Amino acid sequence: MNGKPWAFSWDDKKAGVQVLMAEVTKKASYKQAVDTFITSWLPGHEVHYTQKGLAWRDQWGPNRYSANTAFLALVAADQGINPTTYREFAKKQIHYMLGDSGRSFVVGFGTNPPERPHHRSSSCPLSPAPCGWNNYNSPDPNRRLCTER
């Protein structure tokens, strides 16, 4: 598990494994790897920030990378790795997504939440009605919230 991961995402679990290995083994090398990764996300380091405070790693779905790193920062903080700084980072990132930025990025929650997320099940009518590009390209809000059961 050497080297610093680029991000913690669906196709790259290295940072998450490093956090788990730090917890299980208590080895300084894993704790240092975790600290190196998360510190790279702090202001003034490798990851860019938007004017309103989002740690911005990539243009395609930037909130996922920031939220995932916030999660790892909280787990690391619970392990005693830079707890004050990591908790503050995580809090700022999650609060940004919940609305401190001026809009919520969570469907059905807060101020000005998304109404047309890229999500097939929420933009299509219920089966057996057909779903196609007209549903996808509609300017109207999605028919259902992704939060519905």
Image (cartoon, rainbow, N blue to C red):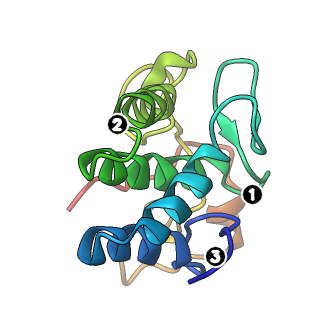
Earlier in the chain: of badge 3 and badge 2, it is 2
Question: Which quarter of the rendering shows the C terminus?
Answer: bottom left
Quarter in which the N terminus is drawn:
bottom right
Above/below status of 9 relative to 32 = below
Q: Secondary structure at mark 2?
A: helix
Quadrant assignment, res 86: top left
Residue type indicated by callout 1: Trp
Q: Nearer the viewer, mark 3 or mark 2?
A: 2
| Disc 3, SS | loop
Determine the CA span between mark 3 and mark 1.
Answer: 24 Å
Name the outermost residue toward the front. 28
Give residue 132's mark.
3
The location of residue 65, given as percent across then percent down, is: 59, 55
Name the residue that disc number 1 marks: 60
* Residue 121 on image: x %, y %: 44, 69
* Residue hosting label 2: 83
